[in-house]
């Protein structure tokens, strides 16, 4: 089996290295946790980034108004001590009076109001703007420790959005003196989180130290060094020699084989991230193309051996999915149409659609290459000539924005938010290039689930929308993820049920 061969090759490589390297773990000796990330870290300001690596860093350096407890999904205080809805569209938030920025200055309500108003401002071009603009009219200071948020409409996820996305900046950060500077915090971050920046060499290394003025519980480890190491083989060698203490997004074969040695501990935990294939059902790339035919899209779904991908390529708690959300999310209806793995049925559907001899499908991908290769192999087996285009995320984003992508393998972690809104809105909004369905009625239906506070009504709306997505095969859902980590045997790294790595909660054994 192809998937098993990948695993065996990885195991052989790790075991060979294990016999040649003597470990020299040094993390606790200088109280420094050294973490490796494959993706380049170029910008420290999460208000202007999106990737999972940047979320991890924001957890270290930043703070939001509220926190979401990963165990219970309940809202906890953070910079804010509490909130009150004056009416359905007026929200008062009370702030702590002991929060300091990393430069030692005190946080004020003006900083909070400025941050939210700036993110909404058209000039900001912030990656977080879409989150804020969907519900915020404006924010205003109403007292020495209070801010009032005026909402555009009823929005049930406003507190979750505040907890997950918007990092507070000092008043005037991005437009001091009237000059717009969107990169003001990109390399010289002045934030409020448990760690502050000591030095930053973009694309190479970030050095953090514990923030003595942090208003919350102090982290146990004094320093964290994040190293950009693009090659997983180099990360592996560094882990085995004691050069790093923490790796994530580790391929299953490597995690299992290296975790079986004394050099590292393999941890596998849950993850809200899901993988899927988005199909150009609307015909943006080709109005008469094969993907505009529902039978072709259904054939693609039937062609994919998703259970095997989940088991052999991801492992752990990964499972095949058949709906356009994570089953653990509120509103994720799993009673929708399920296209079982059936290559013969896939071939029959292609023939019915007029493609008995197949067709050429440019398939774009940017994450796990073995997954992309497995998808391509399954589609090839039913007669589809796959042109696999494995690129960096930035290249995929540009091509998608230009409507040059007929199909791509995407993933989404929902920012750790266990609500279908966190994946449905961004992928089916008519203003989003992620939406390749062109279905205005579907977009309006999904939006309506965010315009009521009634849980039963929201569930019913999502059930209807997800049912349509499945019936029309607008996506080919693949699987949930299981987070695979390799950590130093001396590191205690807790795993949270939402799958978001929180290095600030680590400690030495």
Image: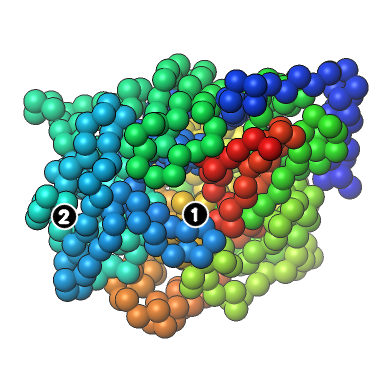
Q: Residue at x 54, y 61 (%)?
A: 71
> Spatial distance from mark 2 to mark 1, Cα to Cα?
27 Å
Residue 212 position within the rendered picture, expressed as x and y whole percent measured from the top left: 39, 31
User: Of helix, strand and loop, which one carries label 1?
Assistant: helix
**Nearer to us: label 2 or label 1:** 2
Q: In the depicted view, which residue is nearer to us: 210 or 436? A: 210
Mark 1, Cα crowd under 10 Å, few <14 / some 14-19 / many 20+, is many
Q: Residue at x 76, y 38 (%)?
A: 265
Quickly name the residue at label 2. 146
Q: Is residue 392 visible?
A: yes
Q: In the depicted view, which residue is nearer to us: 299 or 137? A: 137
Q: Could you say which quadrant of the image residue 11 lies in?
A: top right
Q: Is residue 458 above or below residue 56?
A: below
Residue 355 position within the rendered picture, expressed as x and y whole percent measured from the top left: 66, 58
Residue 167 position within the rendered picture, expressed as x and y whole percent measured from the top left: 32, 42
Q: Residue at x 78, y 54 (%)?
A: 311
Q: Is residue 439 visible?
A: no
Q: In the depicted view, which residue is nearer to us: 326 or 164? A: 164
Q: Is residue 55 above or below residue 94?
A: above
Q: Could you say which quadrant of the image residue 397 lies in?
A: top left
Residue 485 position within the rendered picture, expressed as x and y whole percent measured from the top left: 68, 40
Q: Could you say which quadrant of the image residue 337 lies in?
A: bottom right
Mark 2, Cα crowd under 10 Å, few <14 / some 14-19 / many 20+, is many
Quickly name the residue at label 1. 416
In the image, 236: left or right of 135? right
Q: Residue at x 21, y 57 (%)?
A: 94
């Amino acid at each position: 089996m192809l998937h098993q061969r990948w695993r065996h090759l990885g195991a052989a490589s790790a075991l060979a290295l294990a016999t040649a390297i003597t470990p020299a773990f040094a993390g606790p000796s200088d109280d420094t946790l050294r973490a490796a990330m494959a993706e380049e870290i170029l910008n420290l300001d999460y208000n202007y980034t999106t990737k999972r690596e940047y979320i991890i860093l924001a957890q270290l350096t930043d703070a939001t108004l509220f926190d979401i407890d990963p165990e219970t999904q309940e809202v906890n205080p953070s910079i804010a001590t509490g909130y009150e809805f004056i009416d359905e569209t007026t929200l008062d938030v009370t702030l702590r009076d002991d929060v300091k920025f990393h430069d030692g200055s005190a946080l004020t309500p003006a900083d909070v109001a400025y941050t939210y108003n700036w993110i909404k401002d058209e000039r900001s071009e912030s990656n977080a703007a879409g989150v804020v603009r969907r519900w915020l009219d404006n924010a205003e200071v109403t007292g020495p420790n209070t801010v009032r948020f005026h909402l555009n409409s009823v929005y049930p996820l406003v507190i979750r959005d505040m907890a997950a996305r918007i990092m507070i900046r000092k008043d005037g950060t991005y437009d001091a003196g009237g000059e717009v500077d969107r990169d003001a915090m990109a390399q010289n971050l002045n934030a409020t989180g448990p760690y502050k920046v000591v030095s930053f060499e973009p694309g190479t290394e970030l050095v953090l130290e514990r923030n003595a003025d942090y208003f919350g519980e102090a982290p146990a480890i004094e320093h964290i060094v994040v190293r950009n190491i693009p090659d997983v083989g180099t990360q592996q060698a560094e882990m085995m020699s004691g050069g790093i203490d923490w790796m994530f997004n580790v391929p299953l074969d490597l995690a299992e084989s290296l975790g079986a040695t004394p050099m590292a501990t393999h941890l596998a935990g849950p993850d809200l991230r899901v993988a899927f294939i988005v199909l150009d059902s609307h015909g943006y790339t080709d109005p008469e193309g094969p993907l505009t035919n529902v039978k072709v899209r259904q054939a693609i779904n039937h062609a994919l051996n998703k259970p095997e991908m989940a088991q052999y390529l991801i492992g752990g708690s990964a499972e095949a999915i058949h709906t356009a959300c994570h089953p653990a999310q509120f509103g994720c209806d799993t009673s929708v149409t399920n296209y079982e793995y059936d290559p013969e049925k896939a071939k029959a559907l292609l023939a019915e659609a007029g493609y008995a001899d197949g067709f050429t499908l440019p398939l774009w991908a940017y994450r796990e290459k073995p997954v992309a290769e497995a998808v391509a192999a399954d589609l090839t087996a039913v007669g589809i000539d796959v042109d696999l285009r494995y690129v960096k995320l930035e290249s995929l984003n540009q091509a998608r924005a230009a409507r040059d992508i007929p199909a791509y393998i995407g993933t989404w972690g929902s920012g750790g938010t266990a609500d279908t809104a966190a994946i449905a809105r961004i992928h089916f909004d008519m203003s989003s290039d992620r939406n390749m369905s062109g279905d205005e009625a579907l977009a309006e239906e999904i939006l309506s689930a965010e315009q009521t506070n009634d849980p039963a009504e929201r569930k019913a709306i999502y059930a209807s929308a997800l049912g349509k997505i499945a019936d029309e095969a607008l996506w080919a859902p693949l699987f949930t993820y299981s987070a695979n980590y390799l950590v130093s045997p001396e590191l205690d790294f807790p795993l949270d049920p939402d799958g978001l790595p929180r290095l600030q909660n680590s400690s030495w054994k």
